[in-house]
Amino acid sequence: MAPFPLPIDSLLGHWPSYVVYIAIGFGFGYVLEIAGFGKSTKLAAQFYLKEMTVLKVMFTAIVVAAVLIFLASAMGLLDYNLVWVNPTYLWPGIVGGLVMGVGFILGGFCPGTSIVAASTLKIDGIVFLLGAFFGIFAFGETVGLFEDFWYSSYMGRFTLQQLFNVDAGVIVLAVVLMALAAFVFAEYSERTFGKGLVKKAPRWSLGAAGGLIVLAGVTLFIGQPTNADRQEALAIDQETALTERSVQIHPAELLAYLNNRQIIPYVIDVRSESDFNAFHLPGAHRVPLDGILPLAQDLQLQPRNTLFVVLSNEEAAATDAWRMLNAEGIANVYILEGGINKWLDTFSDEAFQAAYKVESAGVDQLAYALPGALGSRYDAADPNPAAFTIEYTPKVKLSVGRGATGGGCG
């Protein structure tokens, strides 16, 4: 299921993948140039309603990309969870948009189009680009003065379908219809304020618009795959990994990574609040099973050297959490072998086990009757790795090719 987006780095290697990136960048710049986006007068005319080429080209790109992305996702050809969506910082984003908009009006370029103009040796484009570099430098030197605001109103990977709590197909169809309405307005404004200097849209554009509406309707009809759908599609791969025990890591391996500064361990404890309060690992995040999917979007934004380990008292609940996170495309997710019970069996001393160990009351139940809610204050919660010599088979293989990666704006 969902072979795309392709992990280019893994397929081609680090440096050869740059050929692909350069080709995409060149193609993007070429399209902007032939669309006339290297001319400041053409771009500035947008704000005076004389020539709406910018709106037409950008809106066309947006709706075509939206339809193809979500239609491919609905058909199981693309994993949308691996497509980068810039995290939302609401108020900083609004202020940044206003600043960029004012600069666009005054200078006639946005950052991407200024590079296009500069590449064709247009003086105004070169000056604007130099100004952009100066602005980047000034921002870097002063961001500490307003850092609290810069990181305020964080909303994570927040999309319109989440805002309105509807299927992505509804948003896609609405955006297509909104774009068509904007095109009608653009044609009217060009006739009114542009004095007929702009050519009318070709007749084939009506067919293209109808085709987009049909594809958006198909996207809505099929609907986006749920986590259960993804688990069903990945069932064979997941069962193979679980049966071969390739994702269950020994407590000693987790302890080694908890003390490895090159790796960021992110421990997810899916047990009940009472069991968590009785005993947990330092820094563990208690997340009940019904909170795993809402958490998945934040996990996508973690650094790529993050190791996610889910645990329960034994393995049953942790395995359910692993299935969900794996289906959401989260990279580097493992299960603590034997759960907290095996952790305590491995790192607690004989006196502790003699005093507190009991027969488990059932599947995935805590096998220790601990006297109070001491959490991570037990010695066994944070053992010294040097005090133990334990043989185990390493399972962790960090992957950097599956997680969503950052993007930018042209």
Image (spheres, rainbow, N blue to C red):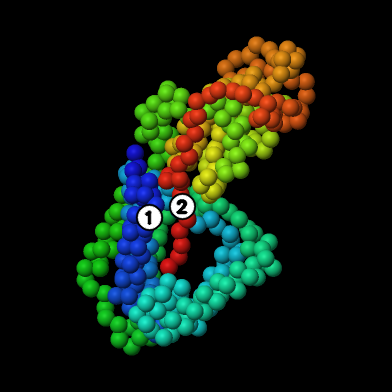
Q: For the C terminus, which image quadrant?
A: bottom left
Q: In terms of image quadrants, where is residue 260? A: top right
Q: Nearer the viewer, residue 57 or 221?
A: 57
The residue sitting at 53% across, 55% down in the picture is 87
Q: Does residue 310 sit above or below 361 in this rendering? A: below
Q: Is residue 47 visible?
A: no
Image quadrant for the N terminus? top left
Crowding at mark 2 (Cα within 10 Å: few <14, some 14-19, many 20+): some
Q: Residue at x 43, y 77 (%)?
A: 114
Relative to 111, does residue 397 appear above or below in the rendering?
above
Q: Pointer 1: residues within 10 angstroms few (<14), some, or many (20+)? A: few
Position in image of residue 74 (x %, y %)? 35, 45
Mark 2 secondary-structure assignment: loop
Q: Residue at x 47, y 56 (%)?
A: 406
Of pointers 1 and 2, the one earlier in the residue sequence: 1
Point out the frontmost of discs 1 and 2. 1
Residue 33 drawn above or below residue 5: below
Residue extending furthest toward the bottom: 195
Quadrant of res 19:
bottom left
The amino acid on which the numbered mark 1 sits, given as a three-letter code, is Trp
Q: Is residue 179 visible?
A: yes
User: Who is closer to the viewer here, 261 or 27?
Assistant: 261
| Residue 167 image point, x, y percent | 43, 48
Residue 405: image tag = 2
Residue 180's tag is: none
**According to the image, label 1 marks what residue?**
15
Q: Check disc 2 and give the amino acid type.
A: Thr
Counting from the top left corner in percent of width and height, residue 36 is at 33, 78
Residue 346 coordinates in the image, percent (x, y): 63, 21
